[in-house]
Image (spheres, helix red, strand yellow):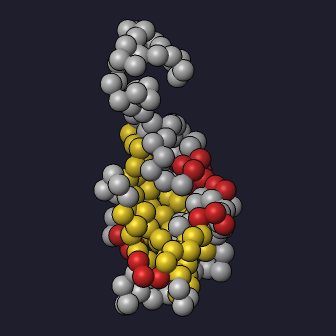
Amino acid sequence: MAIKNGDIVKVEYEGRFSNGEVFDSSERHEKPLEFQLGLGMLVPGFEKAVIGMEAGEEKEVTLNPSEAYGEINPEYVQEVPKDKFPPEAKEGMMIGLPMPDGYQIPATITKIGDETVTLDLNHPMAGKTLIFKIKVISFEESELPKEDHSCSCHSCSCDDDSCEDEEHSCSCC
């Protein structure tokens, strides 16, 4: 039986850059990676590679940046006044930029000038080709949770579980 979207999958893996440097592996974490396929917990190319595999199967896949963390976006490189940073800030340092909702966006300090600091908000692995060795240890058949519409009320005015219209209105808005 082959793995499909929604299944809960357990894999051993090794991820490396095209130069051979290993950046992550289940061995480093001392346990297999377990995830539900289709929730977007992993890069799209990894999830796509696992679909159709079977328990015990192994494969190696090469993911282009578009299938992994995306291309480098120059719009994500920003200059910020230097006085917004502590004196111990250094080039190459990863920092968290606080957002109004309490979350933080990771950024890398790429340059410290006389008056500004250049921040790169791209994912550190953006623009990189990634190679994964994947071995399926096991999987359980499952289904993805039913998606709610975009309103936070979670009630559809259709009052019908078969509704698949993403553009409909709900009873609260």
Taking the image as drawn, is residue 150 in sight?
yes
Query: Residue 60's x, y, as percent?
Result: 62, 62
* Picture residue at 49% right of the left edge, 78% below the top: 81
Query: Residue 167's x, y, as percent?
Result: 54, 20
Between residue 28 and residue 111, name the one nearer to us: 111
* Picture residue at 37% right of the left edge, 90% below the top: 88
Horizontal side of residue 67 vs 2, given as left or right = right
Query: Residue 92's x, y, as percent?
Result: 50, 84
Q: Which residue lies furthest to the top in this view?
A: 159
Between residue 13 and residue 89, name the one nearer to us: 89
13 up-or-down from 38: above or below: below
34 up-or-down from 86: above or below: above
Quarter where residue 154 is shown:
top left
* Picture residue at 57% right of the left edge, 50% below the top: 44
Horizontal side of residue 78 vs 9, given as left or right = right
* Picture residue at 53% right of the left edge, 60% below the top: 134
46 up-or-down from 156: above or below: below
Horizontal side of residue 54 vs 102, given as left or right = right
Taking the image as drawn, is residue 156 in sight?
no
